[in-house]
Image (cartoon, helix red, strand yellow):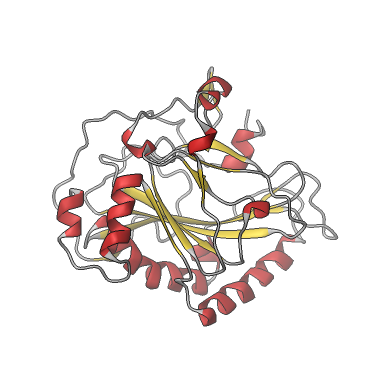
């Protein structure tokens, strides 16, 4: 569906202005959207995740662990597939956030994946400039990620930063030579105007939405407290994947709003093809620091 067709449907959660801003800029931030009781429940489960990671010694199918991880000092970079780890996460992804997704995707919405990322003040928590489309190409670019700030997130916490309007520009090569790096080369990153970057700070319960073509990164955290960020990715039902899902959960490709479609919509703009991840995927953190090479 085109933005005009999507905007013709009445919104469920977002305002019409917020939806228009998303299509114009490639992102939108909404302050204080998540109810307090929902945040309390999410944080309760995250405390359990935190404790469970202490028992792990290396990254696997559930946890992605950073250097120096130990039971005494857990360095959990990511909980993979939170949607199947605990029902609370799936209720969130298939409930209020799926309604938000329908305001962006149109009435027919498919769940793609979720992840719970943590940032640490250890020098290893920067997420370099990249776009999401190249990780999981689809027949069109109505693919987007909704992030939820579970705690207040200021500049010192390493918030998401985006390049406004970049969703209308080029897709970059995320290979460095023959190796998938999951980020722009130093040359391409150096060509970006950092003065144009928008840092999406926000209070607890705020959400961000960014398109899969939007350039984004996350600077290192300067806070001593870990910063959790819950991310859920959705597509319009007429966006069909070209390549294997990097890390499918039991809910991958589940229709969460509307009806199945019989026609795929194709965007003529090309997309980089990632490595064959049908045998498994680690994380963007591992790729960007060279742990996968």
- Give the answer, above or below, for where 226 lies relative to 59: below
Q: Quadrant of the C terminus?
A: top right
The one of 293 and 104 positioned closer to us in this rendering: 104
Residue farthest to the front? 195
Quarter of the image where one finds residue 106: bottom left
Q: Is residue 201 visible?
A: yes
* Left or right of 7 on screen, residue 152: right
Q: Residue furthest toward the bottom?
A: 37
How far across and how far down the image is residue 272, in percent? Answer: 38, 28
In the rendered image, which quarter is residue 179 located in?
Answer: top right
**Residue closest to the eye, 120 or 241:** 120
Horizontal side of 25 relative to 249 (left or right) equals left
> How many numbered discs?
0
- Residue at the location (47% across, 66% down)? 31
Foreground of the two, 113 or 164? 164
With 65 as the anchor, is 27 left or right in this view?
A: left
As rendered, which of 106 and 215 lies closer to the eye? 215
> Percent x, y for residue 258?
22, 66
Q: Measuring 44% from the left and 54% from the top, which residue is drawn there?
A: 113
Does residue 265 lie above or below 207 as drawn? above
Res 86 quadrant in image: bottom right
- Give the percent coordinates (x, y) of residue 85: 55, 66
Q: Position of residue 157 (x, y in %)?
A: 66, 54
Q: Can residue 282 be seen in this view?
A: no
| Residue farthest top in this picture | 177
Image height check: is 56 above or below 215?
below
């Amino acid at each position: 569906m085109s933005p005009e067709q999507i905007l013709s449907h009445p919104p469920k959660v977002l305002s019409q202005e917020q939806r228009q801003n998303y299509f114009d800029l490639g992102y939108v931030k909404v302050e204080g959207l998540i109810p307090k009781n929902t945040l309390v429940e999410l944080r309760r489960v995250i405390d359990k995740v935190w404790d469970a990671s202490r028992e792990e010694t290396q990254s696997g199918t559930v946890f992605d662990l950073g250097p120096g991880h130990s039971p005494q000092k857990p360095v959990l970079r990511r909980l993979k597939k939170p949607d199947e780890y605990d029902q609370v996460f799936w209720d969130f992804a298939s409930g209020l956030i799926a309604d938000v997704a329908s305001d962006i995707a149109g009435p027919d919405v498919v769940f793609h994946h979720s992840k719970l990322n943590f940032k640490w003040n250890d020098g290893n928590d920067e997420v370099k400039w990249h776009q999401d489309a190249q990780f999981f190409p689809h027949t069109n670019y109505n693919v987007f990620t909704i992030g939820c700030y579970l705690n207040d997130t200021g500049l010192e916490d390493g918030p998401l930063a985006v390049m406004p309007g970049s969703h209308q520009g080029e897709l970059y090569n995320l290979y460095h030579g023959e190796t998938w790096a999951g980020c722009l080369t130093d040359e391409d990153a150096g060509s970006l105007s950092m003065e144009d970057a928008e840092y999406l700070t926000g209070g607890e319960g705020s959400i961000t939405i960014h398109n899969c073509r939007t350039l984004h990164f996350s600077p290192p955290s300067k806070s001593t407290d870990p910063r959790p960020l819950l991310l859920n990715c959705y597509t319009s039902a007429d966006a069909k994947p070209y390549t294997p899902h990097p890390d499918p959960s039991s809910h991958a490709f589940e229709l969460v709003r509307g009806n199945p479609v019989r026609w795929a919509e194709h965007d003529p703009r090309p997309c980089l093809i990632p490595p064959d991840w049908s045998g498994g995927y680690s994380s963007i953190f591992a790729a960007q620091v060279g742990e996968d090479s």
